RNA sequence: GGGGCGAUAGCUCAGUCGGUUAGAGCAACGGACUCAUAAUCCGUCGGUCCUGGGUUCAAGUCCCAGUCGCCCUACCA
C-alpha cells in the first residue's frame, strides 16, 4: 500500500445548463469544509470541482439561443459557475470543464484503451422513439393508449404512439460487473455511504445489470470516439472521467501527479446521481485496471417548504440571495450545522436568521467581543501573565480537547455536521465559564488592579482572561474550515499572525491545549464577528 | 409492481449494542447578571416516540402487518 499522500475530494461536475441554486452550493460548501479541515491538519489536499458541458440539452439550449454550444457553455461558466465559487468562498484547487482539452484527450485515450482491450462492443440499441419529442422514451414516460391507439404505447407528452427504432451503438458490458461490484460493496462497506445509499445500490445491482450503450450518433455535441467519428461518447462516460482526467489520467507527463493524487478519497454526490458513481464508475475503472475511489458519499436534498427545490415551483434559490443578507460564512455555517450530512434537510429564511443571531452573533461573535473588551479594559489590550490554574480552567481546556477529538472523528466519518456541533461545545462552555468566573467582579477584588486601574499580571483576573483568550484561539483554528472569514477576523483580534503565524498554518491538534498565545500579545476589540441582523428582509422572504 | 428511506416536544432535529425518569436547539415563560453585539447564564413549561400486533426480564430501538410522506426503478444530466 502506498502512503496516504494526498486527500483527494471531488464535487460532482455541475451540469452547465442549469442555473446554480443552493442545492449545488450545498455540495460545494460541504466539500470545501471537509477539504479545508484536512488542510488545517496540514495534510496534502486536492479539491476538485467543475462543470459538465456536453450532451443534447446544452446543444439544444445553445441552438435556441442561436449560439454555438461551446460559446454557450463558456458564457455560463464565466457568468454563473465560476462566480458562485467566490460567492461561497470555496477554495478549490482545480476547476475542470469537460470541454477542456486535457479532459477530451484523456477521455479519448481511455476509451480507445478499453476498445483495444476488448471492453467495448458494437451492438444495437433498441428503444421506443417519439417522433414529436425527437428522443427515445423510457417505459415510465409511456402510457397505454386509448381510443384509436388502443393497445399501443403512447408518449405521455404527445399522446401519440411511439415507434420501436434501433440504432447501432457501442456498448460497455456493464452486466459482467455485477458480481465484482457486489463483492466490492461487501468487502468495503465504506465504499457507498451513508448506509441507506449503500442499501439502495446493492438492491439495484442485485436485480441484475444491463449493458450500457455508451455512444450516440444522433447529435454531435460530445467527445468523438477515436475509432468512429460518427459517434460521440455518452455524456456520463465522459463526465465521470473528469475525476481522473483532472489529475493526469492518460497524460505521460503527469504520471507522478496522477499516482500521488489518484484514487479519490471521497466523491461527494447528490443522491440523484448516486448510481452512476457507485455502479458505472467503479465498473469503468475495473475494466481499465485503475484503482477505485475509496468512498462515494451521497448527501440529501435541501427541502424548501417541505418539498425538493425546483425551478418550476419557484423554490430554486440562488446562493447569492442568501449570502447578500447573511454573508458567505453564515451560509457555510448554516448548511453545515443545520442539515445532518447525508440526510435531507429543511431550509427556511426564518431558520437561518434565527441560527445566525442565536449561534453566530450571540454565541460565538459576542463571546469574542466580551473577551476582547475585557482584555482591553483591564490590561490595555496586552494579554497578561496568568496566575495559578483552578479546576475551572482545566475543565474548560478539557472541553477543548474533547471538542478536537470529537470533531476529528466526525470529519473522518464524513460528518461535518457533527464536527461543528462538537466545536460548538467550546463556544458554549466558554460563555458559561465567563459567567461563572465573573471576571468583572474579580476585577473589583483587592490586588487585582493597581492604583492606576491596570490589571495585575499573575492574578485571578489575568488567569480568567488568558484562559478565555486561549479558548478563542482554539475556536479560530477549529472554525477556520467552516467560517474562514470570521475565523481570520478573530485571528486578527487575537494578534495571532504576529504571535504564532498564519491561521492556516495552525494544526488542528494545537486547538486542544491552552498554551498558544504568548504574554503581551496585543488583543484588539475590532468589529463584531457577526453583526446582529435585525433587518426584516431576513425573515420576511 | 419491485426496492430504499423516513415519521420522536409547537418548530427543526439527536437518540450508539435493546437497559435508569426519551434528549438538544429554537420558541414561550420565570429568574440571575452587567464584561459583551438588549448579549450571556440558570430554571420552568412542553411527548400516545405514526398505528396495530409480536419477541423479550426490558422496545423509540428488534420482527410482522398497516397508514402517511419522500426517493430509485438504467442510457436528459
Image (cartoon, coloured by chain):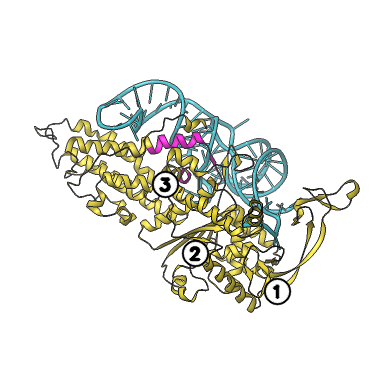
Tags 2 and 1 touching, CB below 8 Å = no
Q: Colour of chain A?
A: yellow
Chain B: give its colour. cyan
Q: Secondary structure at mark 1?
A: strand
Q: Count neighbours of disc 3 (C-alpha within 10 A) and say few if under 14, some if 14 to 19, many if 20 or more.
A: many
Residue A228, labelled with which disc? Answer: none
Mark 2 — residue? A264
Looking at this view, name the residue that lies furthest to the left: A451
Q: Chain of mark 3?
A: A
Image depth: mark 2 or mark 3 in front:
2
- Residues tagged 2 and 3 counted as in contact (Cβ below 8 A): no
Q: Can residue A207 be seen at all in this image of the molecule?
A: no
Q: Is residue A392 magenta?
A: no
Provide residue A418's location: percent of width, then percent of height: 45, 48
Circle 2: element type = loop
**Front position among marks 1 and 3:** 1
Residue stretch in magenta: A335-360
Query: Distance of mark 1 from mark 3, alpha carbons?
Result: 50 Å
Q: Position of residue A540 (x, y in %)?
A: 51, 30
**Mark seen at residue A420:** 3
Q: Main secondary structure of the magenta part?
A: helix
Amino acid at each position: 500500500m502506498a502512503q496516504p499522500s494526498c486527500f483527494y475530494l471531488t464535487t460532482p461536475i455541475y451540469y452547465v445548463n442549469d442555473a446554480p441554486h443552493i442545492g449545488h452550493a450545498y455540495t460545494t460548501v460541504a466539500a470545501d469544509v471537509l477539504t479545508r479541515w484536512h488542510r488545517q491538519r496540514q495534510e496534502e489536499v486536492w479539491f476538485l470541482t467543475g462543470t459538465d458541458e456536453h450532451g443534447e440539452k446544452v446543444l439544444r439550449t445553445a441552438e435556441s439561443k442561436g449560439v454555438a454550444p461551446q460559446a454557450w457553455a463558456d458564457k455560463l461558466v464565466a457568468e454563473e459557475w465560476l462566480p458562485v465559487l467566490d460567492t461561497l468562498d470555496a477554495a478549490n484547487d482545480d476547476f475542470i470543464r469537460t470541454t477542456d482539452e486535457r479532459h477530451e484527450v484523456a477521455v479519448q485515450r481511455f476509451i480507445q484503451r478499453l476498445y483495444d482491450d476488448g471492453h467495448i462492443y458494437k451492438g444495437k440499441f433498441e428503444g421506443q422513439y417519439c417522433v414529436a419529442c425527437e428522443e427515445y422514451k423510457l417505459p415510465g414516460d409511456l402510457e397505454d393508449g386509448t381510443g384509436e391507439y388502443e393497445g399501443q404505447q403512447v408518449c405521455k407528452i404527445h399522446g401519440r404512439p411511439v415507434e420501436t427504432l434501433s440504432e447501432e451503438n457501442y456498448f460497455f458490458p456493464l452486466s459482467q460487473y455485477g458480481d465484482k461490484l457486489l463483492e466490492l460493496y461487501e468487502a468495503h462497506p465504506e465504499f457507498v455511504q451513508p448506509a441507506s445509499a449503500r442499501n439502495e445500490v446493492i438492491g439495484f445491482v442485485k436485480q441484475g445489470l444491463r449493458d450500457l450503450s455508451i455512444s450516440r450518433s444522433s447529435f454531435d455535441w460530445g467527445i468523438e470516439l477515436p475509432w468512429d467519428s460518427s459517434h460521440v461518447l455518452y455524456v456520463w462516460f465522459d463526465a465521470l472521467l473528469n475525476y481522473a482526467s483532472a489529475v493526469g489520467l492518460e497524460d505521460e507527463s503527469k504520471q507522478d501527479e496522477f499516482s500521488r493524487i489518484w484514487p479519490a478519497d471521497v466523491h461527494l454526490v447528490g443522491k440523484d446521481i448516486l448510481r452512476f458513481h457507485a455502479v458505472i464508475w467503479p465498473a469503468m475503472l475495473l475494466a481499465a485496471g485503475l484503482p477505485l475511489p475509496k468512498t462515494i458519499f451521497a448527501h440529501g436534498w435541501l427541502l424548501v417548504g417541505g418539498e425538493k427545490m425546483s425551478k418550476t415551483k419557484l423554490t430554486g434559490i440562488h446562493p447569492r440571495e442568501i449570502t447578500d443578507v447573511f454573508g458567505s460564512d453564515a451560509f457555510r455555517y448554516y448548511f453545515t450545522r443545520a442539515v445532518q450530512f447525508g440526510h435531507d434537510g429543511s431550509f427556511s429564511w426564518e431558520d437561518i436568521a434565527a441560527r445566525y443571531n442565536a449561534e453566530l452573533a450571540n454565541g460565538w461573535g459576542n463571546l469574542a467581543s466580551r473577551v476582547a473588551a475585557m482584555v482591553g479594559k483591564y490590561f490595555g489590550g496586552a494579554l497578561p501573565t496568568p496566575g495559578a490554574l483552578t479546576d475551572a480552567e482545566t475543565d474548560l481546556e478539557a472541553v477543548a480537547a474533547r471538542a478536537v477529538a470529537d470533531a476529528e472523528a466526525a470529519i473522518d466519518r464524513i460528518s461535518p455536521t457533527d464536527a461543528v456541533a462538537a466545536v460548538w461545545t467550546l463556544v458554549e462552555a466558554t460563555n458559561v465559564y465567563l459567567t461563572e468566573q465573573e471576571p468583572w467582579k474579580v476585577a473589583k477584588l483587592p490586588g487585582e488592579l493597581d492604583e492606576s486601574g491596570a490589571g495585575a499580571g499573575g492574578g485571578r483576573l489575568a488567569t480568567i482572561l488568558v484562559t478565555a483568550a486561549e479558548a478563542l484561539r482554539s475556536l479560530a483554528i477549529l472554525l477556520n474550515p467552516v467560517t474562514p472569514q470570521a475565523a481570520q477576523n478573530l485571528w486578527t483580534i487575537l494578534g495571532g499572525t504576529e504571535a504564532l503565524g498564519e491561521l492556516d498554518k495552525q494544526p488542528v491538534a494545537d486547538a486542544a491545549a491552552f498554551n498558544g498565545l504568548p504574554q503581551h500579545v496585543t488583543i484588539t476589540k475590532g468589529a463584531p464577528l457577526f453583526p446582529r441582523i435585525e433587518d426584516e428582509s431576513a425573515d420576511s422572504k
